Amino acid sequence: MKYITAVLFSSVLAVSSYGQEFSKLSFQEFEPYLHRTTDSVYVINFWATWCAPCVKEVPHFNKAFQHFKDKPVAFYMVSLDFGPNVQSRLAAFKTKRNMLTPIVLLDDPDSNSWIDKVSPNWSGALPATLIYRRENASFYEQTFSYTQLKQAIELKLK
């Protein structure tokens, strides 16, 4: 199985009129981070602003981000939003929802070519979350409550 790791924000940085910054990456740019085996726990959430269950769990990711801020845990919210003005819409959403976690805009509409590279267990439904540490990965195609998310992360920290 391939693994995602933190996306270093050295790629194209999108800055909107809202002043919010996030990385905009193709899957080819994102893919090298599927193979890292560092000691941190990585929480990679695939979501979209138009996905009601995704929006519902944003506060849980914010709360977990705050809870684990002093632990070796990295959070990345990988947006699958698309269309006109996607960058400004995403920035406005981030501001409105007070999203604390880093956002990566995955700008690669050919999801059929890369979904299995994230997880062979992924049907393509959102939200989807990969939580891993080194070779110990778990993939979730579900909406998390805060308690469920916290417990999943704590299992990887052990």
Image (cartoon, rainbow, N blue to C red):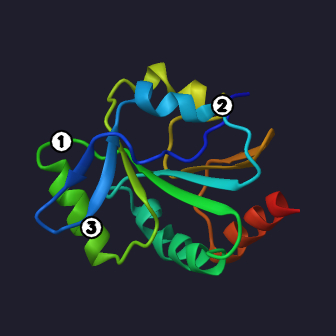
Quarter of the image holding residue 102? bottom left
Question: Which kind of residue does numbered mark 1 sit on?
Answer: Gly
Question: Which kind of residue does numbered mark 2 sit on?
Answer: His
Q: Is residue 80 positioned above or below 72 on the image?
A: above
* Residue 61 marker: none
**To which residue does mark 3 refer?**
93
Quick one: label 1 or label 2, which is nearer the N terminus? 2
Quadrant for the N terminus in the image: top right
**To which residue does mark 2 refer?**
35
Q: Secondary structure at mark 2?
A: loop
The tally of labels here is: 3
Question: Residue at position x 43%, y 73% from top?
Answer: 100
Residue 35 visible in rendering:
yes
Q: Position of residue 127 (x, y in %)?
A: 51, 52
Q: Report crowding for label 2: few under 14, some 14 to 19, many 20 or more residues within 10 A (C-alpha).
A: some
Q: Report crowding for label 1: few under 14, some 14 to 19, many 20 or more residues within 10 A (C-alpha).
A: few
Q: Is residue 140 positioned above or below 29 on the image?
A: below
Q: Position of residue 134 (x, y in %)?
A: 78, 43
Q: Report crowding for label 3: few under 14, some 14 to 19, many 20 or more residues within 10 A (C-alpha).
A: some
Seen as rendered, the residue at the extreme front is: 10
Question: Residue at position x 46%, y 66% from top?
Answer: 101
Q: Secondary structure at mark 3?
A: helix
The residue nearer to you, when weighing 44 against 110, is 44
Relative horizontal placement of residue 72, taking residue 17 as reference (left or right): right
Between marks 3 and 2 in the image, the one whose residue lies nearer the viewer: 2
Question: Residue at position x 77%, y 51% from top?
Answer: 39
* Residue 83 marker: 1
Quarter of the image holding residue 116? top right
